[in-house]
Image: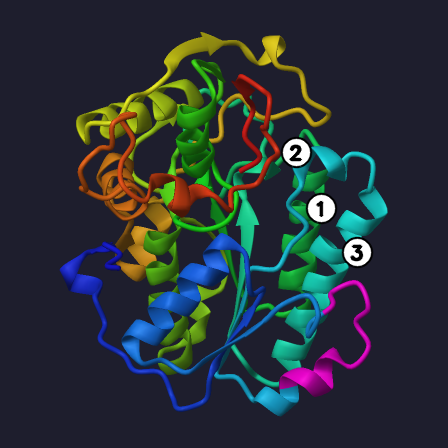
Amino acid sequence: MTARVWVCSLLNIEVKMTDRPILIAGRNGQLAMCLRDLAAMRGLPAVALGHRELDLENREGIDKLIASIAPSAIINTAAYTAVDRAESEAAKVFSINRDGAATLANVAWQMNVPLIHLSTDYVFDGAKPDAYDESDIPAPLNVYGASKLAGEAAVLAAHPLATVIRCSWLYSLYSCNFVRTMLRLCETQPIVRVVRDQHGNPTYAYDLAEAILQIAERSVTVDRRAAAGIFHLAGQGETSWHDFAKAIFDEISRRGARVPALEAITTEEFPTAARRPRNSRLDSSKAERVFGIRLPPWRHSLEACLDQLVGEGETDVEGNRAGWRQRNAPLSDHARGQQAVAPDL
């Protein structure tokens, strides 16, 4: 698996991590899985802790646990991310996304360890007609977004040199995400209805993971002050959920498989417990200026992802690629029986 991060040559600094491991808070989320894969491929020592080992609700002993690992850097991908369920579990969501994140940040600060904390495009209300940059004032529409915004502030208060990265519309080979849901619906639905009036930047988690590791390396070996603060990192280019689905289906069709009919709907036609921003586009130019990192165009990365998920094998008599069902069998059933898709990304 090769992730492609486009790096401006003038700012591409070759650095090496120490022998101390990177600590990845979160084990089984799609970004954590990609970080684990890439660290292994690059020979970087890494320790990934899941909920059982690192309970961000029950925070007793976290400092001793992290001290025993003695990490060179901490990457916090752990979060409560069930956007709709969060509306009815606000206390739990804030306990994890704000208070748990602050605890990690405080431990990292006390240990003089760089911290990279992941946040979301959902801190914005979507009212801006253009892409959001880091100077825009957040105004979350839902509990999840409010908890992540509060987490950003808590992290930077506890660790003034932390790096906070907001990402958008994440997808990968792993876990529950829009691309994998579309692949499953290809097998189960004759018609798929997808919202057309929400726009954002699809981001391949492998690309983001590669960028995060580069930032972590820089934080360990170069002046951390340049990496402090909030940065946006998302795939190049923008699209709607409907057009993202169309691109997925076009790629699958090009590989010889049948695809369902695709119908565009409005947000109002698929109401959800949590409101979503109509505009989730992120301007990532600050990260390019500071780190020399620009993620690839989303269409290029989508093709690379589908090469792994679908492959180039022969179709069977039903028009399915060999191994298709096996690759996608573990998908979440959050959309089972539904023909409309309102993503939680």
Residue 161, image quadrant:
bottom right
Q: What's the CA distance linking mark 3 and mark 2? A: 17 Å
> Residue 132, how many percent across, how many down?
46, 34
Query: Which residue is more in the foreground, 104 or 256?
Result: 256
Nearer to us of marks 3 and 2 is 3
Q: Which amino acid, mark 2?
A: Pro
Residue 51 versus residue 318 in the image, above or below:
below
Q: What's the CA distance linking mark 3 and mark 1? A: 9 Å
Residue 147 disc label:
1
Residue 215 versus residue 309 in the image, above or below:
below
Disc 3, SS: helix
In-image side of 14 versus 101 (left or right): left
Q: In this figure, which residue is indicated by the disc labeled 3?
A: 95
Q: Look at the image and give the residue range highlighted in magenta.
A: 55-66
Q: Is residue 305 visible?
A: yes
> Residue 15, how many percent across, how many down?
27, 79
Q: Which amino acid, mark 3?
A: Ser
Of pointers 1 and 2, the one earlier in the residue sequence: 2
Numbered label tally: 3
Residue at horizontal 46 percent and vertical 61 percent from the top: 33
What is the crowding at mark 1: few (fewer than 14 residues within 10 Å), some, or many (at least 20)? many
Residue at horizontal 33 percent and vertical 61 percent from the top: 210
What is the crowding at mark 3: few (fewer than 14 residues within 10 Å), some, or many (at least 20)? many
In-image side of 68 versus 3 (left or right): right
Q: What's the CA distance linking mark 1 and mark 2? A: 9 Å
Of pointers 3 and 1, the one earlier in the residue sequence: 3
Residue at horizontal 18 percent and vertical 27 percent from the top: 254
Disc 1, SS: helix
Whether pointer 3 and pointer 2 mark residues with C-beta atoms closer than 8 Å, the reply is no
Q: In this figure, which residue is indicated by the disc labeled 2?
A: 140
Query: Which residue is more in the foreground, 83 or 63?
Result: 83
